């Protein structure tokens, strides 16, 4: 069974630009969550989607948005990039929503904002 | 704001030594998970504990959930270089169903 796939693995952007990250969950998993990982703040929850609906949201500004498609694939968008957005963005899929099944993480997209 | 504090932050030990990592919070969690993350990869789930006082063993790793479901510990017996990595605890909040991740413990086991 293929794991969670995130693309691209690495991305370099300039302040003010926008970026879209992609996540393909494990086949059959309907929940996709996004996390930001930085050395200073650790892993922080961005949002969770289940069956194309946002189920949960973390404490990030509106510049961070996401969506989920009918095939459960998800995308995350960050607009007007800031230097502080440089981080590893991790996607995790699970069978069910609301913590009823374990998280399976992808290997992340490392975003560098210059 | 719910926080999960892990201690120690960094640990460098010799192969064969024992160690314990702690994960503490003032909040009650529905369940708690432990993950290990290696460089360039995402976290991989090690265990989920649900009941207060629960103890689970995974080969040389022993996990315990506190009686009040506010804290947890991970004990590794006879550590090996393959145990090297970033260990993360994650608590599932009641009601909001969000995972709160701990601050992480970076373990290095020297051969």
Image (tube, coloured by chain):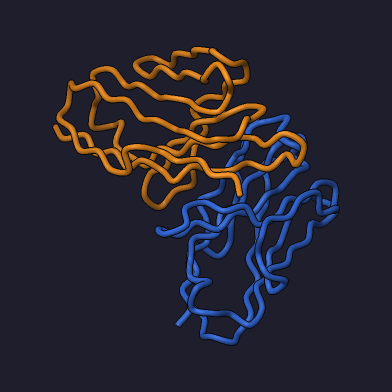
Chain colours: A blue, B orange
On the picture, is B18 further left or further right than A53? left
Q: From what the image shows, is residue A29 above or below residue B31?
A: below
What count of labels does the image hold? 0
Q: Residue A14: percent from the left, percent from the top?
A: 51, 85
Q: Residue at x 45, y 83 (%)?
A: A114
Q: Quadrant of residue B67?
A: top right
Name which residue lies at 52% across and 24% down.
B47
Where residue A110 appears, as percent x and y from the top left, is: 48, 64
The answer to whether residue A83 is above or below residue A54 is below
**Picture residue at 47% right of the left edge, 33% below the top:** B24
Identify whether B96 is placed above or below A87: above
Residue A97 appears in the picture as rendered: no
Q: Nearer the viewer, residue A80 or A2?
A: A80
Residue A67 rendering spot, x and y as whole percentages: 78, 61
Residue A37 position within the rendered picture, expressed as x and y whole percent measured from the top left: 50, 56
Q: Is residue A108 visible?
A: yes
């Amino acid at each position: 069974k293929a794991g969670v796939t995130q693309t691209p693995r690495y991305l370099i952007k300039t302040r003010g630009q926008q970026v879209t990250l992609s996540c393909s969950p494990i086949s059959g998993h309907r929940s996709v969550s996004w996390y930001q990982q930085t050395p200073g703040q650790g892993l922080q929850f961005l949002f969770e989607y289940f069956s194309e609906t946002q189920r949960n949201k973390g404490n990030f500004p509106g510049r961070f948005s996401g969506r989920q498609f009918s095939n459960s694939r998800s995308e995350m968008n960050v607009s007007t990039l800031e230097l502080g957005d440089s981080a590893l963005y991790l996607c995790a899929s699970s069978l069910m929503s609301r913590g009823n099944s374990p998280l399976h993480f992808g290997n992340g997209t490392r975003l560098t904002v210059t | 704001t719910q926080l999960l504090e892990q201690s120690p932050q960094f640990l460098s030990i010799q192969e064969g030594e024992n160690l314990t990592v702690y994960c503490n919070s003032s909040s009650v969690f529905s369940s708690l998970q432990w993950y290990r993350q290696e460089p360039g990869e995402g976290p991989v789930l090690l265990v989920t504990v649900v009941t207060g006082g629960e103890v689970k063993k995974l080969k040389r790793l022993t996990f315990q959930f506190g009686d009040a479901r506010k804290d947890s510990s991970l004990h590794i017996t006879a550590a090996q270089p393959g145990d090297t990595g970033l260990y993360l605890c994650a608590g599932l909040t009641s009601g909001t169903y969000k995972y709160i991740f701990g601050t992480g413990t970076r373990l290095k086991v020297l051969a």
